Image (tube, rainbow, N blue to C red):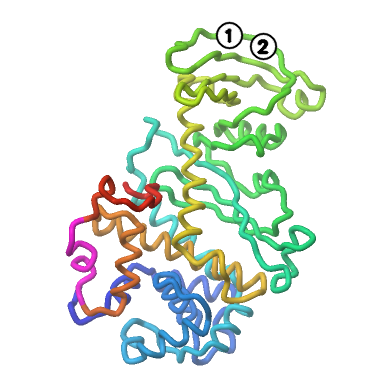
Amino acid sequence: MPIGRTVFAQVLDLIPRRAFERCVARYRGGHRVHSFSCYDQFLCLAFAQLTYRESLRDIETCLRALQPKLYHAGLRGRVARSTLADANETRDWRIYADFAQILIQRARGLYGDEPFAVELAQTVYAFDATTIDLCLALFPWARFRRTKAAVKLHTLLDLRGNIPTFVAITDGKAADVTQLDALVFEPGACYVFDRGYTDFGRLYAITEALAFFVIRGKRGLDYARRVSRPVDKTTGLRSDQTIVLGGPKTATLYPVPLRRITYVDLATQQRFVFLTNNFALPALQIAQLYNCRWQVELFFKWIKQHLRIKAFYGTSLNAVKTQVWSAISVYVLVAILKKKLRLERSLYEILQILSLTLFERVPLSHVVTAFPAQDLLDDPCNQLSLFDL
């Protein structure tokens, strides 16, 4: 890359501009827009995510201080707090949601051969939700409790590369399990859930889609044992059974046999019961698959710590969704950058470097590789290690 271009401009080269403009045209994002385009809006939000800006005024002040460098970075419109606020309020958030999906597909293609904790040829997904607390006075549309507001971020995470493939934003009262209706299940793939997603009608839909699931079983399940298979108890396994559901309602909702596996964590002595429709994998691999579900919990902690999704630049639902989707786009963009440049650094380190060097005129490959990656074993900081691939 040319030395004369800023690091920010070089990062933006990874953006498929024509695909972005198609997303804008799909929702008429350019209608009656003369000076501050949707692309300008996205660049401002991307800048805010990469440099940890706190408010619209913060974004405006910093970008105006860099005014001579903005044109060559691709930002053509004049940055003003009120203009950016209006854009966040009125321009359809689906523009940025659709664009994020384009980036996600590119990232999944790059991370398709990424090593995985369990040796499987199939794609493995983990699905879960996290709650983002809001101020009820500023976000009255997101009432969660009598004195509290919140939104939920429902995420389907591809565990090869930890790339979010599905994201839905709902109010805090929405039941997590209802979002299973929005998923399109991929035949042959495996979906891992916590026990809060126990709904046998919805789980049977996964079976009918020729996909597999692993879910932690709830206590008090009414079932009848049909077959018991021997297990190696030195591995933590306690039982591997074929069962049929016994309750009149559950037996109707899920009319075919299930596999029930009991496992005890040898380190903590905690007992787990797993239900799955996969009868081919070894029982220990089923337990290992559920253990990988923790990756989605780490993903939520990571993005809350390192991206701006806990404090918002606008108070409407459209502004909140626009900011969340722009944050996801930036996260995936940095993941693509890491893979394209074959970097050994973690995403956290890359974000920290970019936050200080966005408008330096040096080759991007040089700025992220000029110094050796930090040895995490000697690092006293307790940083999350989810993305240290």
Tell me which segment is drawn in magenta: 362-372
Q: Is residue 129 left or right of residue 342?
A: right
Q: Nearer the viewer, residue 101 or 357?
A: 357
x, y percent for residue 389:
31, 46
The residue at the point 47 percent across, 89 percent down is 79
Q: Residues within 10 Å of mark 2 (few under 14, many from 20)?
A: some
x, y percent for residue 299:
47, 50
Above or below for 273 versus 192 = above
Q: Main secondary structure of the magenta part?
A: loop
What's the distance in space between the residues labelled 2 and 1, CA to CA? Answer: 8 Å
Q: Residues within 10 Å of mark 1 (few under 14, many from 20)?
A: some
x, y percent for residue 271:
57, 23
Residue assigned mark 2: 225
Q: Secondary structure at mark 1?
A: strand
The residue at the point 58 percent across, 83 percent down is 85
The residue at the point 59 percent across, 32 percent down is 215
Q: Nearer the viewer, residue 356 or 95?
A: 356
Quarter that holds the N terminus = bottom left
The residue at the point 60 percent across, 55 percent down is 153
Whether the magenta-drawn stretch holds residue 366 is answered as: yes
Whether the magenta-drawn stretch holds residue 386 is answered as: no
Q: Is residue 211 left or right of residue 64?
A: right
Q: Are marks 2 and 1 in contact (CB under 8 Å)?
A: yes
Specify the quadrant of the image occupied by residue 192: top right
Residue assigned mark 1: 228
Q: Secondary structure at mark 2?
A: strand
**Amino acid type of disc 2?**
Arg
**Amino acid type of disc 1?**
Ser
